[in-house]
Amino acid sequence: MKSEPDVWSIDQQKKVGPKGAAWDGVRNYQAAKNLKSMKKGDQCFFYHSNIGKEIVGIVEVIKEHYPDKTDQTGRFVAVKVKFTVKLNKAITLEEIKKNKQLSHLSLIKQSRLSVMPIDSKSWKILNNMSKI
């Protein structure tokens, strides 16, 4: 899940606490489809886009998709996520691109997509890169 840190950062997500916050404002149909596939308990990487361009933490889905209150058309959804952990070592986009085992990730192939799936093998590789 990608967010510009000057709009919504990992520190803001942490500050909200266990009640979590809505992940809303997604207006791309493919990203919205990815939100709809998320299940309660799913773990998600939190990526700072534009400023930093790095994975900085992990959040957990605490409420599955529901109508996005910021969408006047009624076509898009939101999920609710809570802070889990801030990475000791952020993983930069540059580091991700250098790892050939991660070359298939949407983060590289579809860089403008704000919500994207990740396979379990890549999840483990990224966790190792962050020293979790």
Image (cartoon, rainbow, N blue to C red):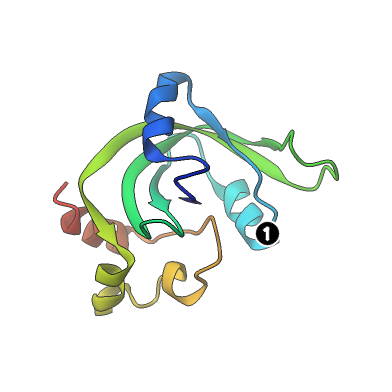
Q: Amino acid at mark 1?
A: Asn
Res 55 → quadrant: bottom left
Residue that carries the numbered disc 1 in the rendered image: 28
The residue positioned 14% from the left and 51% from the top of the image is 131
Counting from the top left corner in percent of width and height, residue 84 is at: 33, 33
Is residue 1 visible in the rendered image? The answer is no
Counting from the top left corner in percent of width and height, residue 57 is at: 32, 44
Left or right for 102, reference 79: left
Counting from the top left corner in percent of width and height, residue 62 is at: 49, 29
Is residue 33 visible in the rendered image? The answer is yes
Q: Is residue 73 above or below residue 22?
A: below
Along the line of sight, which residue is nearer the eye, 11 or 71?
11
Figure label count = 1
Along the line of sight, which residue is nearer the eye, 105 or 5?
5
| Name of the residue lying farthest toward the left | 131
Badge 1: residue crowd in 10 Å (few <14, some 14–19, many ≥20): some
The residue positioned 28% from the left and 36% from the top of the image is 85
The residue positioned 43% from the left and 32% from the top of the image is 13
Counting from the top left corner in percent of width and height, residue 73 is at: 85, 45
Q: Tell me the SS state at disc 1.
A: loop
Left or right for 65, reference 54: right
Res 53 → quadrant: bottom left
